[in-house]
Amino acid sequence: MTQEYTFSMIKPDATKRNLIGKINSYLENNGLKIVAQRMTTLSKEQAQDFYAEHSSRVFFNSLIESITSGPVVLQVLKGDDAIIKNRKIMGATNPRDAEIGTIRKDFAKNIESNSIHGSDSLKNAQREINFFFTTEEIVE
């Protein structure tokens, strides 16, 4: 197993329902350590830059509208095989397909309001962490 960092974002649909602590407990109880965390509301420009890889997709505008609709919690997580572990804890993107006991199965409203975002690769984890955090903000 390799110690890794990954990025996580608790989305507005979850923050509006006061689920931050519950979601954090899923992460921490499954071996991930939160080494950086802050709450903010993304501007439209930040959201468009962050999700630029999806800009040609049909769902892009609704994604931007959804992610900017309220506060998000930005996080850096650390742990053994953190990227894969976090994706397993989150569950499938579509909560209907997610396994019981995952964040999306337990808290998501639908495929768009699916409560949490997580990096899908080491390359994206590095990009996403660097997008929102400085090295000094990551505390172990």
Image (cartoon, grey):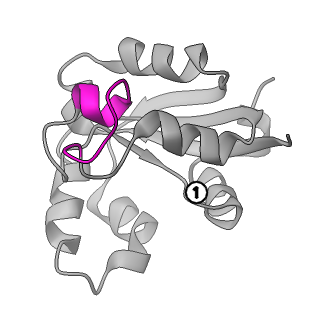
Q: Residue 135: x, y in percent?
A: 78, 43
Which residue occupies the foreground of this view, 18 or 138?
Answer: 18
User: Does 100 appear in magenta?
Assistant: yes
- What residue lies at 34% left-to-right and 49% top-to-bottom? 42
Horizontal side of 112 relative to 24 (left or right) equals: left
Q: Residue 58: x, y in percent?
A: 17, 80
Q: Quadrant of the C terminus?
A: top right
Q: Which residues are magenta?
A: 95-107
Categorize mark 1 by other alpha carbons within 10 Å: few (<14), some (14-19), many (20+): many
Q: Which residue is mark 1?
A: 128
Secondary structure type for disc 1 = helix
User: Does 44 appear in magenta?
Assistant: no
- What residue lies at 41% left-to-right and 76% top-to-bottom? 52
What amino acid type is highlighted by mark number 1? Glu
Which residue occupies the foreground of this view, 43 or 34?
Answer: 34
The reply to whether residue 71 is visible in this rendering is no
Q: Quadrant of the N terminus?
A: top right
